[in-house]
Image (cartoon, grey):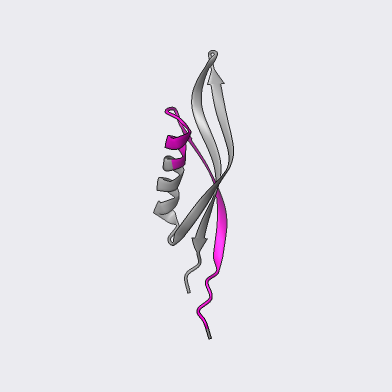
Amino acid sequence: MTDARVARITEVIAGSPKGFDDAIQNGYKRASKTLRGITGMRVLEFRVSVENDKISEYRVRMEVIFVLED
């Protein structure tokens, strides 16, 4: 019998005033504090928040994929 792996996906929304790359890193860092066995992420959506005619925050909505433990 082969060892089967089962994964789960959870959704994370993260932001940064610096840019989308930083928002992705922030989301990954936070998710990795709680979730073990992360194997990948998929960015589903990019958004920005605007205040006083300027972009104030870059936001990403991501799926975090992780393997379930036995």
Q: Residue 21: which quarter of the image? A: top left
Residue 70: % across, % down = 48, 74
Residue 31: % across, % down = 45, 50
Q: Residue at x 44, y 27 (%)?
A: 17
Task: Looking at this view, name the residue that lies furthest to the front.
Answer: 2
Residue 20 within the segment the image draws in magenta: yes
Decide if residue 10 is on the left or right side of residue 28: right
Residue 12: % across, % down = 53, 46
Tell me how many marks there are: 0
Is residue 1 placed above or below 30 in the rendered structure?
below
Q: Residue 50: which quarter of the image? A: top right
Is residue 57 placed above or below 7 in the rendered structure?
above
- Which segment is the magenta one? 2-24
Is residue 69 placed above or below 18 in the rendered structure?
below
Q: 20 or 57: nearer the eye?
A: 20
Task: Looking at this view, name the residue that lies furthest to the right.
Answer: 44
Residue 35: % across, % down = 45, 57
Q: Residue at x 47, y 70 (%)?
A: 69
Task: Looking at this view, name the residue that lies furthest to the bottom.
Answer: 1
Is residue 6 placed above or below 33 in the rendered structure?
below
Q: 36 or 40: nearer the eye?
A: 40
Residue 23 within the segment the image draws in magenta: yes
